[in-house]
Structures are given as C-alpha cells and as structure tokens.
Image (spheres, coloured by chain):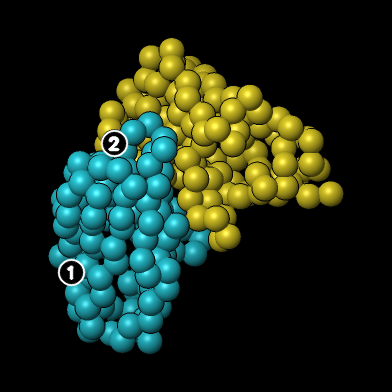
Amino acid sequence: EVQLIESGGGLVQPGGSLRLSCSASGFSITSHYMHWVRRDPGRGLMWVGFISPDGTRLLYADSVKGRFAISRDIAKNTLYLQMNSLRVEDTAIYSCTRNSDMHPFDPWGLGTLVTVSS
Amino acid sequence: EIVLTQSPDFQSVAPKETVTITCRASQTVGYSLHWYQLKPDQSPKLLIEFTSRSLSGVPSRFSGSGYGTDFTLTISSLEPEDAATYFCHQSKTSSYNFGQGTKLEIK
C-alpha cells in the first residue's frame, strides 16, 4: 500500500526554521515527482514545490523561493522540506504527495501542522 | 500563472439533490484538470482526473466534464457523506494551481 507520513511540524517564531519529513512506503520516491502542498482554512491549497524523480530539478512557488528547500534521502525513502525565515503567513498544514508528469497528485499524506507565531 | 476560479464558494443542498461546481481557468489547461474532495482531519482525496476520468472506488454519482478553460464537477443524488470542500487543480503547468475551494453542506 502506498503511504506518505509527514512529521516535524510545530510552533515556531517568525524568522525561525523548521524541517519537515515525509516518510514514503509502498513505492520509491525516485520513481515520481515528489511535492509539498500546504493548506489552511483561509487560503485553501497552495503548491509549495517539487523535486524531480532523478533529483536534478527543484521548483518552488514564488512565495517560498529562497526560503524553503526540498531534499531527499533515497536510502530512507524520505522527503524533506527545510523552511527558513518563516513568516506568520506560512502557518498551514503541510502535506507531501506525488505525481507522474502532468498527472494529478495522489495519494497525499495527512500532513503536519506548522504554526508561525510569536 | 494560471488562476483557477471556482463557483460557488459555498452551497447548501438537500440529500438526493444534484449539485454542480464550476472551475474556470484563466488560460487553457486542456484536459489537465482534476478534482479533489477534502474533509476535516483527512487528506485530500482524488475524485476525478483529467476532467472526466473517475478513480477506482469513487461513487458513480461523481462526474466531471469540460475542456480548455471551463470545467464542471457534478454530484448527483447527494449523500450526507458528500459534505466536504471540493477543489479543482491543474497540472498543465508546473505552477500546479488549485481553485479556492467550494464548501458543500448537506442540509
């Protein structure tokens, strides 16, 4: 069974950092584009970024570019999201998901809550 | 960047009725438009891929149509468990935009 489980969320002050993890099982993260997507009640769903199957291509939403970085550990089959210079507006549930080229995102992890507040 | 605009933002419908949610794209996405269902404390669930293709296990009362810039999700014979927020999503471009969501309440 394909499963994605996120961890690492929590409460952090503005300007702080956090690293999220996404543990994948039932497939290899090198076989799909792996994405981070965030959601919050006020602004809905927002795509954050992806890493390509071969790991050579990284792409980010403009609002997180230069602050967030996606990486992976192939041996652990785990995806990461390093979040720096966090802002109050980054508060959201962060989920990982996957797709193949131009396909929809499926499945999704439940997500981990990141709260940026002083 | 492609902007997806859903309507309505909220709808309250009685059981057994039919509801239609629309999604309009600011530029063509071809057939690369997908629909998700999101319930509280759950992860988004893919319902319809590539405009009209239903996923295995999704009830047949969910259907999609459209092409280019105008798309619809139709839910017929509504059940109480269909209460959720529905999002459209484009995968034509790598901005992977989502619609703002339509919250569906079952009366």
Q: Is residue A27 above or below residue B104?
A: above
**Quadrant housing the N terminus of chain B:** top left
Q: Which chain is in cyan here? A: B
Relative to B61, say whether A106 is above or below: above
Number of marks in the image? Answer: 2
Can residue B45 be seen at all in this image of the molecule? no
Give the numbered dot on residue B18: none
Query: Which of the marked residues, 1 or 2, is nearer the chain's N terminus?
Result: 1
Relative horizontal placement of residue A16, taking residue B70 as reference (left or right): right
Identify the residue at horizontal 28%, vertical 78% (top origin). B79
Q: Which residue is mark 1?
A: B61
Residue type, label 1: Arg
Quarter placement of the C terminus of chain B: bottom left
Q: Position of residue A36 (x, y in %)?
A: 49, 36
Cβ–Cβ below 8 Å for labels 1 and 2?
no
Tint of chain A = yellow
| Marks 1/2: CA–CA distance | 26 Å
Identify the residue position indicated by label 2 in the image.
B92
Q: In the drawing, does residue B56 fall left or right of residue B5?
A: left
Is residue A41 at least partly visible in the picture?
yes
